[in-house]
Image: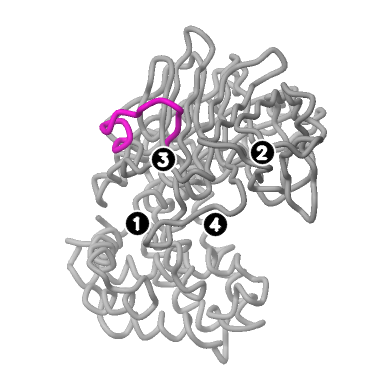
Amino acid sequence: MKTLSCLVLPALLLASAGSAARAPAPSIPDIHLRPAEAGWRVEYRFAGPVREFFLLRNPDDSRGREWRSADPALRIVHEEGRDIVRRQDGQAFSEASFELPARFVVFDADYAPFSPFTDGGVLIHSGRFHACAVECPKDAQGNDQPWRFSLEPPAGTNVIVAGELHEGRAEWLDSGSGTMVYAGKGRPIETAHLLAVVDPGLPEEARELLENLLPALMDHFAQRLQAPAEKPMLFASHDPGSDDGRYGSKGGTLPGQVFMHFYGPGWNDPDRADWLRRWMPWFFAHEAAHLFQQYERNADPAASWIHEGGAEAFAYLALQGMPGSGIPGDFLDEKLEQAASACAEGLKQGSLADAQADGRFHNHYECGLVMQLALHAAVVEASHGRQGLFDLWRSYIERTGAGAPWSVDTFLAVAREFAGEEIADQLHMLATRQPVDAETAMSTLLARARQSTNASP
């Protein structure tokens, strides 16, 4: 995550936003966001004249219909899947400004640009506003050059970006897929390991659950694994009238943050309270776990059971017995049993190593949960109760951080050290080959994974 503005940015602020203080290339504009009458305004300022520039991340062609240019000569055209800004007369320009509605929309393959809160706050995805003239340049190491962003929030509101709370204007360098930026009056839940904003308009039971659960989850993981350098951020927003009255939820993760938006009026239905109690803690526990894994995103997809299964297991271990988790006692048992059954069915269709290519990516979650909990029980047994899965993972993170590849071989080498050859060989077989009898293979691991219910630490 990085930052923006047409002003000179303090080096300390740039560093806190996770970026070196590099000057953007001339083909990258400074980007400024501020409230407008119809929602928000985005302003692009180039260091010199350009004939046209490209808006990145184009899941549809809605910008041309919904972004209103302050200059009637400037327009957005959608050509060959790209949104291009140019003047109708073909003349060069160095600034462009657009006003757009701050409403939630569901994109199939991207994040919503705005996730409104019931109290008037909003979560903004900066990646929706990335733009370049000609090509987006790279630095000498092949990394994207950063965009300099600034955001001027409504009077009396706060901004949260890059793990920091700003009372008023914020500036940051931005790159990659962008980041989520909060602007609103809500005072965040802030602890040593967390900045979180929970929508006050969520159903009371769900809101109180999250307010109690999120700090406990982050403390739990931070005590067992190395805390991220940048304070993690978690956001839960609610818009009962959004998206044409449709009902649902959509969320995800970006570096250092987890977010979920609940849209439509259906969330206030009391009949959904039980589902929320089960699903919401699991979602945030799983995604929060990823923030502590130091995951290498360029890793071999065949190794996805390591981080996805690991996050599932971290969620399971964190939520079992955690005061205030809100999860009914039978949920975790059902989750484990269902995962084992689904994993066995998936393995009948092919190996776990081929799951992503075969469209069975969910097998990395299902098989991974059983595999990692079985490994946890084996570590506890081998160490006579002194160590568990988190100790193994701490060693794995240290090893990959020192240059070892994020891979099945590296992970299983650590597993052998902590739990012995037998369990490591079982996991190696499931991770790399299609078992002759998938149900027997999984039932063996499931029996061991069940021990995790009572295993410690």
- Local crowd at mark 1 within 10 Å, few (<14), some, or many (≥20)? some
Rounded to the nearest angstrom, the CA distance separating label 3 from label 1 is 18 Å
Return the residue nearer the eye: 286 or 175: 175
Rounded to the nearest angstrom, the CA distance separating label 4 from label 3 is 38 Å
Q: Which residue is pictured at 55% across the width and 52% down the height?
A: 136
Q: Which residue is pictured at 27% across the width and 57% down the height?
A: 456
Residue 444 locus on image (x, y percent): 45, 79
Q: Which residue is mark 2?
A: 249
The answer to which of marks 1 and 2 sits earlier in the sequence is 2
Q: Main secondary structure of the magenta part?
A: loop
Q: Which secondary structure, mark 4?
A: helix
Q: Name the quarter where the C terminus is drawn.
A: bottom left
Q: State whether residue 322 is above or below residue 135.
A: above
Residue 286 locus on image (x, y percent): 47, 50
Q: Amino acid at mark 3?
A: Lys
Q: Looking at the image, is mark 3 or mark 1 nearer the viewer? A: 3
Q: Which residue is pictured at 35% across the width and 70% down the height?
A: 375
Q: Which secondary structure, mark 3?
A: loop
Q: Which secondary structure, mark 1?
A: loop
Horizontal side of 369 relative to 341 (left or right) equals left
